[in-house]
Amino acid sequence: MIKISQIGTYITCLFFCLAWQVSPAHADQYKIALIHSYEEGYIDAKRTLEILKDELRANGLKCDIREYFLHCEEYEEAPENERMSLFIDNLSSWGADLVAVLDDQATYALMACNNPRIRRVPVVFGGVNFPNEGLLKQYPNVTGHVDFPDYCRTSHMIERIMGPSRICLLNGMTYLDRKIWEALNEQCEGKIDISSQGLSNHVKRHAANKEELNILPTGEKYENETINKTRIIRMESDLMAIRDLMWVGRGSHTTFLLTKRDYTTRNAAALFSNPSFATINEGFGVQDNLLGGYFAPLETQLKDMATAIKERLRGQMPNQQVSSYDKQYVLNWHMLEKYEIPTSSIPQEYIIMYIPFTERYHYFILYGSILLGIIVLAIIILLSISYLRERKRKREALHNLQYEHETLCLAIEGGATYVWRLEEDAIICDSQFLELIHHPNDRIALAKLLTFIHPEDRDRFQRNYAQIRNHPQYKGQYRCSFSGEYQWWEIRYNTINTAGHAPLITCLLQNIQEVKDREEELIQARKLAERAELKQSFLNNMSHEIRTPLNAIVGFSNMLTSDPDLSEEEKQEFNTIINTNTDLLLKLVNDVLELSRIESGSLSFHIKEESVRDMLESFYQTYHFQVHPPLEFIKDFPDEDITLHIDAMRLQQVITNFLNNANKFTSSGYLKLGYYCRTEENHVYIYVEDTGKGIPATELEMVFERFYKRDEFAQGVGLGLSICRGIVERMNGRIEVSSEEGKGSRFTVVLPIQLTDN
């Protein structure tokens, strides 16, 4: 038995060790250098990285991917090779485990740059249309997939969907252009008409008769040309003017065929009225006007690349250095909808991609909704039947208990005072109280009694109950729910001691809810009186605050008009004093009006999306020059930016008020403006911190009260923070304050982060 137990323990440990080793959380992480042929942000860049990451993850690989962009359209061959060589040096120093390279230009430059370091690392390429077989033979460590363009099948695809058409392609004199044109002629010779000249004559020859267009019946499709046989026409990309391209593209039977991706073809499809087709996958699925073609889509390309990367990282070499993708006839569903091409006209062997979920499973959703509706209706019917039966049963029971119910109501209404008697750990009650709580017998245990007492009062009741035998008399008030709602009850007891007998403890239970209600009414009346007194204090303070600047304005105005001997310097000083006091008076009036608008709900807000970082940076730059020296104005912004739906002007009003207070009451140290985000709480915290006087802990809750002023000699009536709180609450936020007297304060605006789901 001991040996069997030891073997079982060993097998269990071995199992957990193996599970630990193969766990994705502890899998090796590989460094992969991903080299793009084109520039940062090209149309497929982001999508390529996301799909490749997903496919590598699906293959069980944990990878750190570093991207490089060759910018092939910006360089001639020699500088392009030098740039690639620098990439190779960099990724070698980084310690890349594998290099993944995309498209023809980057794949060619990788081998043509002759950097010996590339021979020491596995290389997997993809998306190549015309591989350089001579260079590939020199690099056995470079393997991958190619997608040889099939121009003939793509042209037949265009003809099946669009009818006989003039297929236009842009082609220049580069090496890639020559390879494309040679391959096209070789594939289409004897199958499809091909022409490298005579575009203008072909357009004019097939133009529709204008007289026929003038008598076009209502509802007929407008066609400005008639073409009976498909023809591929080469347009010289180095010589073709945009005006001529637009003239050709307006043809109702003219389509554009994308055969390469460079600056000459990038936006050419937009100049054609009809949808465009392609023999390469660049931009398919994201570029407008591109309907489809015969090629391997980007998803297939990257799936095969991820599989090849997995094999190469495990030290496995493919059977062939160069493999071909499985090409497909693919169409973009969104472009079919845009150009009103019915899916019923599409051959079955064609694959329609990017179909929305609601369209792909339209019938399943429809039938499922109908089935769900039937089930819900059946449940409602069954519940209705059950409800009617239960209602009938309750009506009969209610009829039988009606007399008892009326009697109980009379007992409850007749008196609200009940008598108890304590015996050991139980309470003996009178019959009226038992009827009130629906108890079957006259003995109630303490545990049962506690269930009627409010949770916040239970501990206090238990403590007093434990001391009941040590005190001859007691009176306590508790919230109890004897009749379905918590009301105030008063418990009085008296202990009677007799010789030779146990103490007799009697209790009186009395409902004092009316007394409590009257107390609450008195409290509310006192609050109203205090509020009236506070308003009177406000009016007194207002009269003082208004009188001070008015006296200054009137006094100095009289001096200006009555004393002709004043110098210009004195007049200027008096004008400054008058203007300053006028501004103070105006601010006082504006504060009162602002508070009035907040209280009435008429304060306008213009809510829109705002970047917290940009907004606070603007606040910081605006206020930077108002900080009194020698104070230091610090900003504390994290790297993470947050977007909020707020009124930036109102928030600036709040933050400026915080900064003004901090600037006013801080003589040394710093002011700090910053923010941070707590994603788990879905809130952003914007704060102003200072090293000023601070606020006593006893006054922290008072600073937002209207008319509150800690320093009675400071200007203002104490409305600023009250206004700030009203503004922030209107934006669904709150203000938090923390302070220590003599060390400084921090005022924080807490705002919710609203998700952009409309």
Image: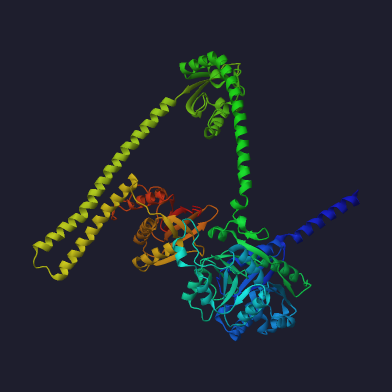
Please say whether residue 707 is visible from this viewpoint: no
Please say whether residue 643 is visible from this viewpoint: yes
- Give the residue drawn at x 39%, y 50%: 725
> Residue 79: x percent and y percent?
59, 85
> Residue 418: x percent and y percent?
51, 19
Q: Give whichever of 502, 48 is nearer the camera.
A: 48
In this picture, residue 701 sits left or right of residue 102: left
The number of callouts visible is 0
> Residue 558: x percent and y percent?
12, 59
Q: Is residue 19 above or below residue 701?
A: below
Q: Give whichever of 594, 143 is nearer the camera.
A: 143
- Give the residue drawn at x 34%, y 50%: 603
> Residue 730: x percent and y percent?
40, 49
- Give the residue drawn at x 19%, y 61%: 578
Quarter occupied by residue 202:
bottom right
Q: Give whichever of 5, 496 is nearer the camera.
A: 5
